[in-house]
Amino acid sequence: MKSQPTTTLESQAKAHLEDEFPDEHATAVRVVWWDEGGHLREVVRAAADQIGVGFSEAERFPLELRRTAAKEPESPHVWYIPEAKTVEDSEEGLIERDWFRDIRETGGEIELTIEQLTAELYEVNPWDIYDVERGTESDRETAANVIKNQFASGGIPRYGDLIGEIITKGEGQILEHLLEGGWPEIDKDDETIARVQKSLKDRHVAPADSAETPEEIEDVVWKWAVARWLVAEGIDVDAFPEGYGNVGSTLGDINPLKRIVDTRQSTRLAKRYLSESYWEGVIGAYDDAWELAACPVDGALDAALWDAWLESLEEEEYTKCIERANERQRALEVYPDDIPWTTLWKQAEQVAKLKSRFTAWEERPKSFDPFDQYSAQDDGTWKIDYGVLELEITGEPEQDRLLNSHPATGTLPELRSELLETRYLNYLEEMSKAVISSFSTGSPLAGKDAAYEWWTDNENELATGETVALFLIDALRLDLARELANRLREDYSITEDTRVSTLPSETKFGMAALTPGRAHRFRIKLRNGKLSVERGGQRLDNKGNRVKVLEREGWDVPEDSDSGWQRNQVAYYDKDIDDIGENELDNPESHFTDYIDELYDLITEELENGNRDRIYVVTDHGFVLLPKGTTMESISSYNGDGEVKYRRIAGDDIEDAGTGVRVTGQTPGTEYLNTSVRLLAKPRQYNSKSGLTDARYYHGGILPQECMLNFLRVEKE
């Protein structure tokens, strides 16, 4: 047997033709080539071209070649017949169709199939290439196509590689095929099983010899490949049973599974190699599982990594936990992003970050400004709120059936419950106490930039006539604005401006504060028992009035993001975030972050294709999103003539005593108020007379999440 011949199919066919044609074949000499199955057509045609002779094919019946010979030029010719010379008749048995004796006398006659021609190259029997008597016509055609494709791929295939491709029906080498697709496409007869075992032995998969069924061979191959990867990551070969960890010195590809996993981005491979435990005992005996973290196969390894990670978390080694969760995510990047194991480690990272931030919050100084503590750029507690959103978005990966045996199925729900329900609600409660305390002992809003002053502070830039877009986004909470800024900062110049919202932190007042006009002329007052807002005597209670003011100042106000953006100065209102929250859509956290993606796309589109010099992103208020299932407390202490809303009461008769925080025109920072407003601070409280009941999403009160804002100024670098 030749493992690697030096001759191609065409060259071998050419040699046969040259042997049959006389040395001088200038006359009309014929050579007949019988090819049972007709799979050598193009090979024989190409060989004839190489020696400069003609080619004719019997398309319907062999003897038609005699009838068409008169039309052929007086030159040497190959007559190709895609049939067997000897055929079987039901009555007469085998019949040899010896119809071209005269041709054979002057020229020649060849009987060769693709299996026979290929067998000559490798010096084996034709049935070693493909057993025609055992196989079906369809499988034979598949094998023939595999042979031709292998020889047409730029080189002469090794015998083992060619046989592997034939066995897998062109789906790759046997080892690689089993690693990726398993056995399904391979025949299951004893002869094929034996050939598969021989091929695997040639690839040093020694344990396959002891496997008897296709299922056992699959299992052996998968375990062998996982062992090879673990050895590559550092486990000693001797830790595995004989034949699994070691590999022959002549084999170049010592980790074939890595090459497959790295290039496929396959969810199927993730299921096969992460949902099953292959070497639990070996991994359990290894000193430090995290030394193997770069290996993205074996469910036993992922389980061991989780157990070790959890120990570090319990020891409050949060930085280490964050780094390790990141490391594991990078290892799993060879699979699609949506596999449950990747989501699991994303959530592990978020859990560690949140625990770290909650710990920092719980160790805060006794005296602090809650509004500054929340909004601080680098270490503000707004990162807790955004972390809670991120954790909610990743859902419940342990519910995926593929993780049934993973230890995270028992511990992760408890971790989430602790963070999302207990500690986050405690954080909001403690923040509300700090807010109330800050008002009772001082003036926490004094000296802080206010949203109603924004237009006055920026009127010179806004009046330059440059091509500017003003995005007036309803309920763009500070953490969402910071996330948007961080994304835009990669390509643009960003200036952030932290401000206190207009109080009450409701859309009517917040959006009115962002219309053109001088700050000192801005007022909120009671009108017929309801709070009303104006600037310079111009009522701004509804969007229509606000739009008129903007248009009067030269701003176009498009109705949507698709049209009306032609003018130099455009003011665009968008209330998607508020609609998502108030309409109580399922999974609002995902909708919020999806909206940031959409807003990012719209801003970049205007900067790049709308040729905007500058874009401002401003907002009216933030919001609170409580943990699912939070029990609310209704407040019904007010019986006056003022206006009652979910998170505030407004009226001239509001007394100092009462729930929440009372602000007036004499309160530093709310000089625009011409009446008294009592704002709720405790996260689980609402006013029963508002007509609303329990709500996860709300705004209007005095928690920093409701009233601390982040405005953006975006320009090209």
Image: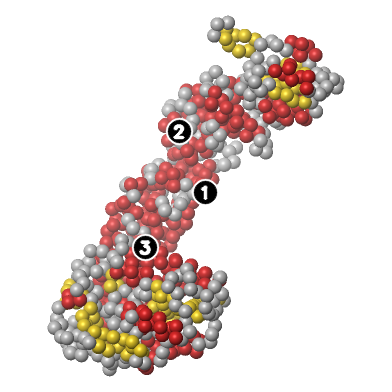
Q: Residues within 10 Å of mark 1 (few under 14, many from 20)?
A: some
| Pointer 3 or 2: first along the chain | 2
| Pointer 2 or 1: first along the chain | 2
- Can you give x and y, in whole percent of width and height, for residue 562 in the image? 47, 68
Number of the label disc, if any, that sits on residue 590: 3
**Residue under numbered circle 1:** 262
In this rendered view, identify the residue nearer to me: 243 or 181: 181
Q: Residues within 10 Å of mark 2 (few under 14, many from 20)?
A: few
**Residue under numbered circle 2:** 184
Please determine whether, in this image, residue 544 is positioned above or below residue 138: below
Q: Secondary structure at mark 3?
A: helix
Can I make out residue 281 in this image? Answer: yes
Can I make out residue 489 in this image? Answer: no
| Pointer 1 or 3: first along the chain | 1
- Measured in 3D between alpha carbons, the distance from the residue under mark 2 to the one under mark 1, in whole angstroms, is 23 Å
Q: Is residue 697 left or right of residue 519?
A: left
In this rendered view, identify the residue nearer to me: 256 or 578: 578
Number of the label disc, if any, that sits on residue 47: none
- Can you give x and y, in whole percent of width and height, for residue 636 in the image? 14, 78
State which mark lies toward you, 1 or 3: 3
Residue drawn at 45 percent across, 74 percent down: 558
In this rendered view, identify the residue nearer to me: 269 or 622: 622
- Can you give x and y, in whole percent of width and height, for residue 389 in the image? 35, 66
Residue drawn at 36 percent across, 79 percent down: 543
State which mark lies toward you, 3 or 2: 3
Residue type of the residue flagged with mark 1 = Asp
